[in-house]
Image (tube, helix red, strand yellow):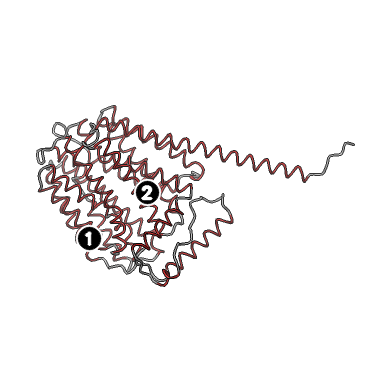
Amino acid sequence: MSVFFPTLLLCVYGFFSNLRPSEPFLAAFLMGPDKNLTETQVVNEIFPIWTYSYLALLFPIFLATDYLCYKPILVLQASSLVVTYVMLLKAQGMLAMQLMEFFYGLATASEVAYYSYIYSVVEPAHYQRVTGLCRSITLFGSAAGSLTGQLLLSVAKVELLHLVIITLTAAALAFVAPWFLPMPKRSLFFHKSPGSAEEGQKGGSAALLEKADDAESKVPLNIQYAPISSSSETERPRRGLLDVLRMLFDDFLQCYRCRPLLAWSLWWALSTCGYFQILNYAQPLWEKVRPSHDYEIYNGYVETASTLLGALAALLVGYLPVSWSLWGELALCVMSLLMAVCVFVMDMLKNIWLCYAAYIVFRAAYMLLITVATFQIAANLNMQRYALVFGVNTFMALLLQTLLTLVVVDSVGFGLDVFTQFFIYGGYFTLIAVVFLLAGLCKLVSRRRSEEEVLGNGSAETGSDSPPISDT
């Protein structure tokens, strides 16, 4: 029962907070008669605010989530979503929409509380089951919202304003759930349970001994380092901010010394940056290719299909017979190249059906690879390091996205039109593919040389041990 109740509330919250029928039609709504904003205002001045606020709030929210034990940040996220859609419904003008994007950035940054709360109230034996359930329900909520919005728009012929009202209603229902969640008594960093340091040290020591037995036959990411904690920290579960920051920095240095982890993290940051840009600006691109005021649009079907196909691709990862430790870099190269082709198709062919198809393939490819990167990085990392590495990767992705937005999108920079932006994004993914092609080839050459050296040493030893050949 102690597991069931918070899991049920989290699933209810995750479903309704992601049930957003208006989401696939946001650009059309902002550029339509309800808000009467121009494409330049929406693309170059309003949408970038989400990126900037998400980046600025991510690290403070990450620390506040742990210090306040998750629940208050979940309430903050729910409140931010309600404020976002109230402003989308009622407010007018570019400044109001920019403020709306700030609140949406706050809600997005607070998602860390949703995915980490459950680990503080259930036992480790239930982690995998409840994590899969919570993640699945958010995807299902997102797909259901997109499909509902499209059906209401195409079949019932409702106005876009009514979709915003339904989204606000779902956000209001989601707002109720976090208030009934039990308040955790422990967290990963500030409020550790008294035995957690000891358990972590034992786990770390065991993993180090295991790695010493066989360093090459296992994925190099299966490493746990002994926690950086003094005996006083073990005796005193509550930690100060400076203690936590020092511990996080030490862990950061140790984690990223692992070269495979660094490679997967690099792809994570680079690709997530581009992925966010495509998701943010795909709707304005579609609006240019097929204007909603002249034609019927099918953005909701596309978002539903891409979400479900992405979830299916993520599920199939576990059944792919691929040695990721050997072929990982080349796989990242091939899939990044496929993503680049999809972006170029969306940009150059200017056919709405090809745009939709390329977008679906693009999202599916990303979801597949990000799932691989997730389990390659997280395999046998303790929960503390898991949160740190994923947080750092997301922060670096947002930092890169902010720079890309500032230079390419924002009116402060070049303020390029959406077609030129997508051409640059296609080149960006091509560059990622080239980087990992070179990395993969270098790895294969290095591995081949190592095998030849081993064979050469083995032959020399065999020759020296064999009896001399007689001339007679």
Under mark 2, the amino acid is Asn
- Disc 1 target residue: 75
**Residue at x-position 26% and y-position 47%:** 143
Query: Which numbered tag is attached to residue 393?
Result: 2
Query: Which numbered tag is attached to residue 138?
Result: none
When the figure is inspected, residue 200 is found, relative to residue 39, above or below; the finding is below
Visible residue check, residue 9: yes
**Residue at x-position 47% and y-position 42%:** 328
Residue 217 point in image, percent of width and height: 56, 50
Q: Residues within 10 Å of mark 1 (few under 14, many from 20)?
A: many
When the figure is inspected, residue 18 is found, relative to residue 331, above or below; the finding is below
Residue found at the far right of this picture: 472
Q: Nearer the viewer, residue 71 or 142?
A: 71
Given this view, does label 2 or label 1 mark the residue nearer the observer?
2
On the rendered image, what quadrant is the C terminus found in? top right
When the figure is inspected, residue 235 is found, relative to residue 67, above or below; the finding is below
